[in-house]
Amino acid sequence: MKKELIEKINKLKKEKNAIILAHTYQNVEIDEIADFSGDSLYLSRQAAKTDADIIVFAGVYFMAETAKILSPKKTVLLPNINAGCEMADKINLKQLREFKAKYPDIPVVCYVNSTAEVKSESDICCTSANAVNVVKSLNSSKVLFVPDKNLGAYVQSCLNGIEVITYPGFCPIHHNITINDIEKQKALHTDSKIMVHPECTKEVTDMADFVGSTTAIIKAVKESNNKSFIIVTEKGVVERLQRDCPDKEFVLINENAVCKSMKLLYLEDIYNSLINNEFEINVDESTAQKAKIAIDRMIRVNA
Ligand code: 13P
Ligand code: SF4
């Protein structure tokens, strides 16, 4: 049954000249039909350079929107239109304008987990993979950082001589992870390395052995000689590591580390999306043109 569905999806992909991009937090079965799986930066780069006519984005809304902005002539599909991001919803255009008015003439770095409108009035985007290098690339003594105060604080901790002024947004899934959670797991797994996503609070990233994007965490685990890891980000990272590294032990920081929007898709949804061309993502042209400048700049900065 599953095998048949995979075959049908692969056939449709060929017929329609479609590719499937899958974020690391997706249900792990999605990787079986994905052309590219990884973090936001990696997937944005794939969206920018593909020759496909259709991009099916197995991820959340802002990711599909970013793909559409990067490849405006292509059809971009988000298989479940309700896959939003609570972080992206924390700032709208009016709030960004108010924030900028409070701190005039300072460049704005906008985390890619944001709406197209917010990107369109920012100077440059970043992802969790290249945020530090993006801020450095501006050669400015001060930057505004929206919407994630935690990623902004992490960037600040990596840089001397640059002030990172953060907007008070956050991802609830990462923000709610506490130092108590880390201490509890560390007491149970004393030899484990602590691998943390920078959307967690500064107190939590301070306790980490490694801080990085989802792809960076997976790479660091694979390259490490250590046998046990506490994974301080969303559950999808643990599922991929368990699949890829069966000889190592992975502990999810707590059972609430699950992004509901990322868990909406199964193989059937990808099949339906391809068959029905659903749900097509479009971005207002003038917003898209302005947002593209900030996203193109981001793509040029390495992780
Ligand atoms: P990555 O930058 O690792 O893809 O993370 C994106 C995200 O939404 C984390 O919550
Ligand atoms: Fe958004 Fe948080 Fe889900 Fe990432 S984990 S997509 S930041 S809600």
Image (tube, grey):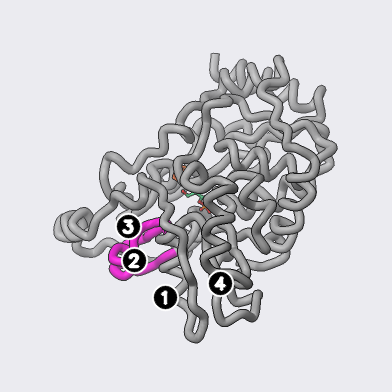
**Kind of element beneath mark 3:** strand
Q: Position of residue 298 (x, y in %)?
A: 67, 61
Stretch in magenta: 194-211
Q: Is 56 included in the stretch rendered in magenta?
A: no
Which residue is labeled 1 in the image?
A: 157
Mark 1 → mark 4, Cα distance in angstroms: 14 Å
Which residue is labeled 2 in the image?
A: 202
Q: Dot 3: within a 10 Å radius of its alpha carbon, few (fewer than 14), some, or many (20 or more) residues?
A: many
Mark toward the start of the polypeptide (4 vs 3):
4
Q: Is 209 included in the stretch rendered in magenta?
A: yes
Which residue corresponds to the image point at 41% horizontal and 52% vertical from the top-left? 170
Residue type highlighted by circle 4 = Val
Mark toward the start of the polypeptide (1 vs 3):
1
Q: Position of residue 123 (x, y in %)?
A: 67, 63
Instruction: Work out whether residue 228 can be spotted.
Output: yes
Q: Position of residue 103 (x, y in %)?
A: 54, 69
Mark toward the start of the polypeptide (2 vs 3):
2
Q: Position of residue 242 (x, y in %)?
A: 40, 45
Q: Which-is-in-front pick, marks 1 and 4?
A: 4
Residue 219 lies left or right of residue 199; in this view the side is: right
Residue type highlighted by circle 1 = Ser
**Kind of element beneath mark 4:** strand
Residue type highlighted by circle 3 = Phe
Give whichever of 35, 257 is nearer the camera.
257
